[in-house]
Amino acid sequence: MVSDILSLTTRNGALLLATHSDDFLLKLAVVGTVEELSTSLVTQNLVRDQFETIFFSQVNFIKAALPMLRAEHTGHIMVLTSIGGHIGTPGMPMYTAATWALEGFCDSLAYEVAPFNIKVTIVQPHKEIQTLTNKIIFSPSLPYYDSENNPAPSVRDMLTNMLNLNPETAIEQSEVDILHRYPKLPNASTDRLVAETVHALTAIGGHENPPARHIVGFEGAEAVKEKLKTVTEELEDFVEASVAVDIFESELKNEARQGKARTVDDYTGMLPNSMAP
């Protein structure tokens, strides 16, 4: 389904494995709420397609390359995902789920291959990069999730409005048919969308001590930073419920109660240096 994902080069004495697709970054983006993607066998197959292109395709190529990287006792695996690995998006739940699955795989893989001097980096561009440079598939819509009836942000509406700016890609949403479009952007716009990610790959690839995650672009870094802040605040708000299950008293338990649990600053190592406080 996806070809030319495997690219091997040599940089600073390390073998570099970068996963990508024939449309530069990845894949297809399936648009549809959980309920919209559950209405028929055809829409359920879209869920499988989403996981095939985002998760299984990259996992299979990484598995194929591991024996060579292990034999060389060096290497750097770089996997392109998106900030969807941190932040859910209403209207693209399966895209997000497949991205989280791939990142969980990579987190576990990093521990497994570290003894062989193989590094793993997840590169997270903004979602718009993958969405606007690849095939977009719209599941049939349900009226309950129309913007008039549902206050949740509508990715379907935003992408439809963008596609309708070009007569060649104009689209009218359907409650019956599955629709798909390839966005047609000016070459200059496409170049700007992908330039930051290309720079990140070339700057990080083969680095002696690469980050486990690298977020591309200021907006993405700010969005992830805000999400981590929210998660930390929720942990602190419900710390009593968390520690209530601990049988034994401990210093760590007391510190948690005093609000000394880890803060979002502990996570800034995954952000670009310019974003760190």
Image (cartoon, helix red, strand yellow):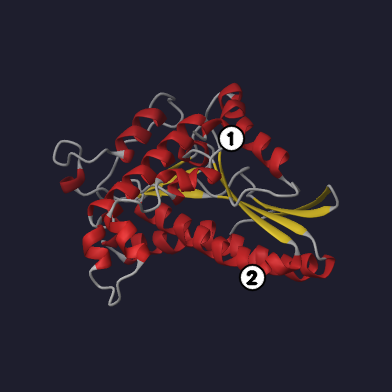
Quadrant of the rendered image containing residue 73: bottom right
Residue 100 position within the rendered picture, expressed as x and y whole percent measured from the top left: 45, 57
- Badge 2 crowding class, 10 Å Cα cut-off, few under 14, some 14 to 19, many 20 or more, is few
Residue at 30% over, 71% down = 249
Question: What residue does disc 2 label?
Answer: 112
Query: Above or below — where is 246 with respect to 12?
Result: below
Q: What residue type is labelled 2?
A: Glu
| Depth check, front residue: 60 or 22 | 60
Q: Is residue 89 left or right of residue 185?
A: left
Residue at 50% over, 45% down = 82
Q: Which amino acid does label 1 sit on?
A: Asn
Q: Distance between the residues labelled 1 and 2?
A: 27 Å
| Depth check, front residue: 228 or 46 | 228
Residue 49 position within the rendered picture, expressed as x and y whole percent measured from the top left: 47, 60
Question: What residue does disc 1 label?
Answer: 273
Which residue lies most toward the left here? 149
Quadrant of the rendered image containing residue 227: top left
Mark sitting earlier along the chain (1/2): 2
Q: Can residue 136 be seen in this view?
A: yes
Residue 57 position within the rendered picture, expressed as x and y whole percent measured from the top left: 59, 61
Residue at 29% over, 40% down = 173
